[in-house]
Amino acid sequence: MKTLVLIPSYNTGRILPLTVTEVLAQWPNVWVVIDGSTDQSETLLQPLLANNPGLRVITLPQNAGKGAAVLHGAKLAQEVGFTHVLTIDADGQHPAEDIPHFIQLATQNPNGVMMGCPVFGPEAPQLRVQGRKISNAWANLETLGWGIPDSLFGMRLYPVAALLQAFRGTIWARRFDYDTEIAVRLAWQGVPMMEIPTKVRYLTTEEGGVSQFRYFRDNSVLTWMHLRLVFGFIWRIPLLLLRGRNPLKP
């Protein structure tokens, strides 16, 4: 295994260098994909580049979406020999201190996806907490209960080859629909998935917290995505029945 931590970022402001600093304290190979940001993110990361040879900043000329940023980074990672990528959000919600745990479990299950499953604190918006239950229910229906621990949580460790194969199966999954659609398509491929309980933080504005989530826009994207996946699921039912259950599911 050769693992890279991949951080897609769009206009995350001053929280971005803090997130990257926390990640670098846990793992030396870190790439940040700046997805057409307009907040001078590259400048904010310049002080970290001098003393961290494993840090790379990749800048996309225009905003293409989280999934597109992950796809771009994963392709480049495979080209230089990385076998696995651990994705973590740039907004400080995911605990960098859990990175070694994800990697340790992946070394024992190198063909599987290590799926973060959020453990929410009392500050978590209930609209988000309850809304993801609906998405999770749809995702498990679309995979005959394969066992997707959480369809929306972005902290995951993927085998690069499996991730790129999932992307090749769709022209979608480039924006907010990325996390869910890629999880479903990995399940359709029969890729094992392990649930890893992971604390999630919702930072206040004063702490530098920022969210790109737009309730009506992004829920519309998810609704269209699930409609597409349901139709894709129907003709795969015989294959999914033959495959059986997720071997990493308890």
Image: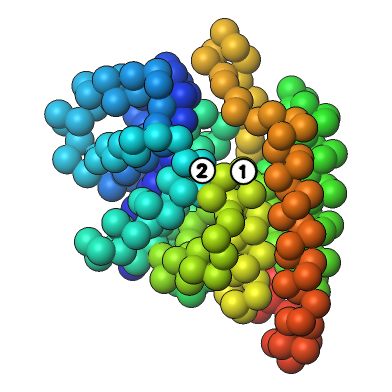
* Residue 77 in picture, x, y percent from top left: 30, 57
Residue under label 2: 66
* Residue 54 in picture, x, y percent from top left: 22, 44
Q: Where 99 falls versus 114 (above or below)?
A: above
Q: Where 155 falls versus 11 (above or below)?
A: below
User: Label 2 neighbourhood size at 10 Å, few (<14), some (14-19), many (20+)?
Assistant: many
Q: Where 54 falls versus 236 (above or below)?
A: above
Residue under label 1: 176
* Residue 139 in picture, x, y percent from top left: 76, 61
Q: Is residue 101 visible?
A: no
Residue at 25% over, 40% down: 56
Q: Amino acid at mark 2?
A: Lys
Is 205 on the left or on the right of 105, as rendered?
right
Give the image quarter of residue 211. Answer: top right
Q: Amino acid at mark 1?
A: Phe
- The colour scheme of the drawn protein is rainbow
User: Label 1 neighbourhood size at 10 Å, few (<14), some (14-19), many (20+)?
Assistant: many
Give the CA distance from mark 1 to mark 2: 7 Å
Give the image quarter of residue 186. Answer: bottom right
